[in-house]
Amino acid sequence: MTPPFDDDVRDVVRPTTIADFAVALAALERVLAEGEARHRDSWRRQTVQEHVQHALRHLHAYEAGDVGDDHLAHALTRCAMATQLAAASRRTT
């Protein structure tokens, strides 16, 4: 199966930019807004490891075919939260 590109575009090399992740960033923003409405900013009180574990649960659910939640968006969000907390931890040590 060939990638969904026009023949004229295949040889064009362009750098990946943040715009290439517009769908993922919109999903991140949506999950963050839903979480904020439900839990306020409780994500800041969880550990990096707790966020990683939640992300893994979402990834396993996605792999298992569970469609009851947008598991990739939630895993992405948990990874973003873990990354943010880890970076903040490194700055304070």
Image (cartoon, rainbow, N blue to C red):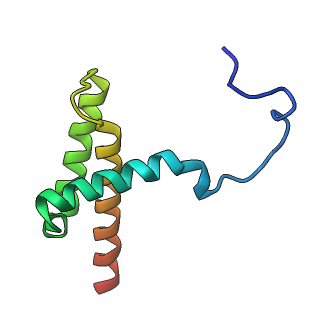
Residue 57: x and y in percent read: 21, 38
Q: Is residue 90 above or below residue 11?
A: below
- Examine the image and state in which quarter residue 37 appears: bottom left
Residue 71: x and y in percent read: 29, 37
Q: How many labels were placed on the picture?
A: 0
Residue 83: x and y in percent read: 35, 63
Residue drawn at x 24%, y 24% is: 66
| Residue 63 seen | yes
Q: Name the residue furthest bottom.
A: 92
Residue drawn at x 85%, y 36% is: 11
Q: Is residue 43 above or below residue 61?
A: below
Residue 39 lies left or right of residue 15; in this view the side is: left
Residue 28 lies left or right of residue 93; in this view the side is: right
Residue 51 lies left or right of residue 39; in this view the side is: right
| Residue 78 seen | no
Give whichever of 20, 86 is nearer the camera.
Answer: 20
Q: Name the residue furthest front.
A: 37
Residue 31: x and y in percent read: 29, 51
Q: Name the residue furthest top.
A: 1
Give whichever of 41, 58 is nearer the camera.
Answer: 41
Residue drawn at x 21%, y 28% is: 68
Quadrant (top left/top right/bottom left/bottom right) for the N terminus: top right
Residue drawn at x 45%, y 53% is: 25
Quadrant (top left/top right/bottom left/bottom right) for the C terminus: bottom left
- Examine the image and state in which quarter residue 75 appears: top left
- Examine the image and state in which quarter residue 70 appears: top left
Give whichever of 40, 63 is nearer the camera.
Answer: 40
